[in-house]
Image (cartoon, rainbow, N blue to C red):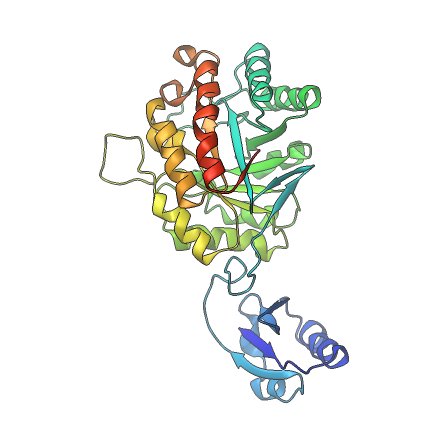
């Protein structure tokens, strides 16, 4: 439900009205402003118990829209300022373009330190790496777990790189206090209990699109996090399942432009998981930049042929350096600053 307040309403009138919603009805809401009009957006479904005549009796209320639309906080209708995510002194969104690079899995101390050195040498500020790995097969490498997370955080302390890693189960959440960006993987996009808990923290969340999820379902998952109070959400398009088998998944480039049109949230693209082969990473990244993406997340390994997971789609260290050089002109044309 959306309540539009009158333009001439004063603070005393508005505060009395909000107290009614909060105290008398016990409702959660968000007060925002668009086109010089203050809007009160009621969250959840409890608003159905409200007496409409009582709402309209307040001098500050202009009219009430009883829309049953589920996507609210993620929509530009309710926030016409693009969300900018701050990670320390780094900024994701708006006029910035971020590159997140690193291995699919943290495999050893030597490996992750070697890759981190390369990230830093080419100016990349965000290091990705899987400590806990959800795998389709129970016999595949599942990651180093807590040890892998310790290695990532040690690298962070030594290099100053921001760490992006995936949370696979809420029981590990306490271990992620020093992680800079928590990744919610495609398989957990609709793990609603996890999303609710992540809504209670203020740490940036990288929310990957589910492998067979629609854009609306993806935004609904983001809505869970935002409605819990955490506005620091970054969407990640990582390819969806179609009937095409040439690539691992099909990168939905249109999703980038759609998100930029209807949502204020930043969006990055993961061409590595979409393609499944490394030679497609560069052209898909350039396409993402042209479509308006705020960044890319690319898999990098010091020896892809020996990688314990997803070696086929990982760039080696030299290839990654060339990749950075190749996309810089595209970032410049898009009027963004490379991070």
Quarter of the image where the C terminus is located: top right
Residue 243 placement, left or right of 183: left
Q: Position of residue 55 (x, y in %)?
A: 61, 84
Residue 13, placed above or below residue 224: below
Q: Quadrant of residue 279?
A: top left
In this rendering, the count of numbered labels is 0
* Picture residue at 33% right of the left edge, 30% below the top: 275
Residue 34 placement, left or right of 188: right
Q: Position of residue 168 (x, y in %)?
A: 52, 34
Q: Position of residue 111 (x, y in %)?
A: 54, 12
The answer to whether residue 158 shows anywhere in this view is yes
The answer to whether residue 136 shows anywhere in this view is no
Q: Give 125 or 45, whichever is nearer the viewer.
A: 125
Residue 244, placed above or below residue 314: below
Residue 73, placed above or below residue 146: below
Q: Position of residue 4 (x, y in %)?
A: 58, 77
* Picture residue at 43% right of the left edge, 14% below the top: 307
Q: Give 156 or 296, whichever is nearer the viewer.
A: 296
Q: Quadrant of residue 54?
A: bottom right
* Picture residue at 36% right of the left edge, 40% below the top: 211
């Amino acid at each position: 439900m959306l309540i539009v307040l009158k333009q001439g309403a004063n603070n005393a009138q508005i505060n009395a009205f909000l107290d009614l919603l909060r105290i008398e009805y016990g409702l959660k809401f968000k007060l925002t402003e668009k086109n010089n009009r203050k809007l009160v957006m009621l969250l959840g479904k409890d608003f159905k118990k409200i007496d409409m005549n009582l709402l309209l009796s307040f001098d500050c209320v202009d009219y009430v829209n009883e829309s049953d639309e589920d996507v609210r906080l993620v929509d530009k209708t309710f926030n016409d300022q693009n969300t900018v995510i701050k990670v320390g002194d780094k900024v994701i969104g708006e006029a910035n373009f971020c590159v997140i690079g690193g291995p699919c899995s943290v495999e050893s101390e030597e490996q992750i330190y070697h890759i981190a050195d390369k990230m830093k040498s080419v100016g990349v500020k965000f290091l990705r790496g899987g400590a806990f790995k959800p795998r389709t097969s129970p016999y595949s490498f599942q990651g180093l777990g807590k040890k892998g997370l310790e290695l990532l955080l040690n690298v962070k302390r030594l290099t100053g790189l921001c760490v992006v890693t995936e949370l696979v189960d809420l029981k590990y959440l306490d271990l992620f206090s020093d992680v800079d960006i928590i990744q919610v993987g495609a398989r957990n996009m609709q793990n609603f209990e996890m999303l609710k808990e992540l809504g209670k923290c203020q740490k940036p969340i990288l929310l990957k699109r589910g492998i067979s999820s629609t854009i609306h379902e993806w935004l609904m998952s983001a809505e869970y996090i935002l409605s819990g109070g955490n506005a620091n959400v970054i969407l990640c398009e990582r390819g969806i399942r179609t009937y095409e088998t040439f690539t691992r998944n099909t990168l939905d480039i249109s999703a980038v432009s759609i998100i930029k049109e209807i949502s204020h949230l930043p969006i990055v693209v993961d061409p590595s998981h979409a393609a499944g082969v490394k030679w497609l990473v560069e052209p898909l990244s350039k396409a993402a930049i042209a479509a308006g993406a705020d960044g890319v997340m690319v898999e990098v390994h010091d020896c892809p042929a020996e990688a314990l997971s997803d070696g086929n789609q990982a760039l080696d260290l030299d290839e990654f350096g060339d990749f950075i050089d190749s996309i810089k002109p595209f970032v410049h044309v898009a009027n963004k600053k490379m991070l």
